[in-house]
Amino acid sequence: MDWPIAEAKNRLSELVTRASSEGPQTIRRRKEAFVVIPEHKYKELVGEQPTFKDWLLQGPRIDDLKIPPREGSPMRKVDL
């Protein structure tokens, strides 16, 4: 069902109930449209996303990373 934004604001509880029982609900504001769906449907669409911590831990190991030493050139002069 299409909902104008003002009606969606006034009847938010009904909109959410209908999204759960009838399927996606569309809210229109000017030329934009927004879709309300239950969380489990959203997760089906986008898949399970790793947390930021999990993403970092799944990255390449740096234990054996070889970082060359700095060359012996002097630092550049900066006027403060």
Image: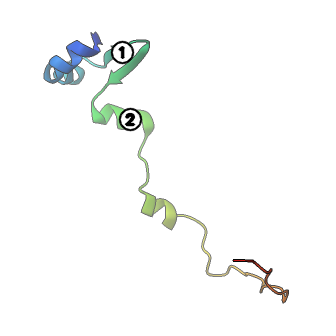
Question: Which residue position is annotated with label 2?
Answer: 44
- In depth, the one of 59 and 15 nearer the eye is 15
Q: Which colour scheme is used?
A: rainbow
The spot of residue 79 in percent (x, y) is: 74, 77
Residue 45 lies in quadrant: top left
Residue 29 tag number: 1
Could you say whether the residue bearing mark 1 is in a helix, strand or loop? strand
Q: In this view, does 13 lie above or below 64?
A: above
Quadrant location of the N terminus? Answer: top left
Q: Is residue 80 above or below residue 2?
A: below
Residue in view at x 24 percent, y 21 percent: 19
Pick whichever of labels 1 and 2 is earlier in the sequence: 1
Task: Rate crowding at label 1 as few (under 14), some (14 to 19) or many (20 or more) other CA atoms within 10 Å.
Answer: few
Task: Rate crowding at label 2 as few (under 14), some (14 to 19) or many (20 or more) other CA atoms within 10 Å.
Answer: few
The spot of residue 43 in percent (x, y) is: 36, 38
Residue 16 lies in quadrant: top left
Residue in view at x 60 percent, y 73 percent: 61
45 left or right, relative to 58: left
1 or 2: mark nearer the eye: 1
17 left or right, relative to 4: left
The spot of residue 25 in percent (x, y) is: 29, 17
Could you say whether the residue bearing mark 2 is in a helix, strand or loop? helix
> Rounded to the nearest whole Å, what is the CA distance between mark 1 and mark 2?
26 Å
Q: Is residue 19 visible?
A: yes
| Amino acid type, residue under disc 1 in the picture | Arg
Q: Do the residues labelled 1 and 2 touch (CB within 8 Å)?
A: no
Q: In this view, does 3 lie above or below 54?
A: above
| Amino acid type, residue under disc 2 in the picture | Glu
Residue in view at x 73 percent, y 81 percent: 67
Quadrant location of the C terminus? Answer: bottom right
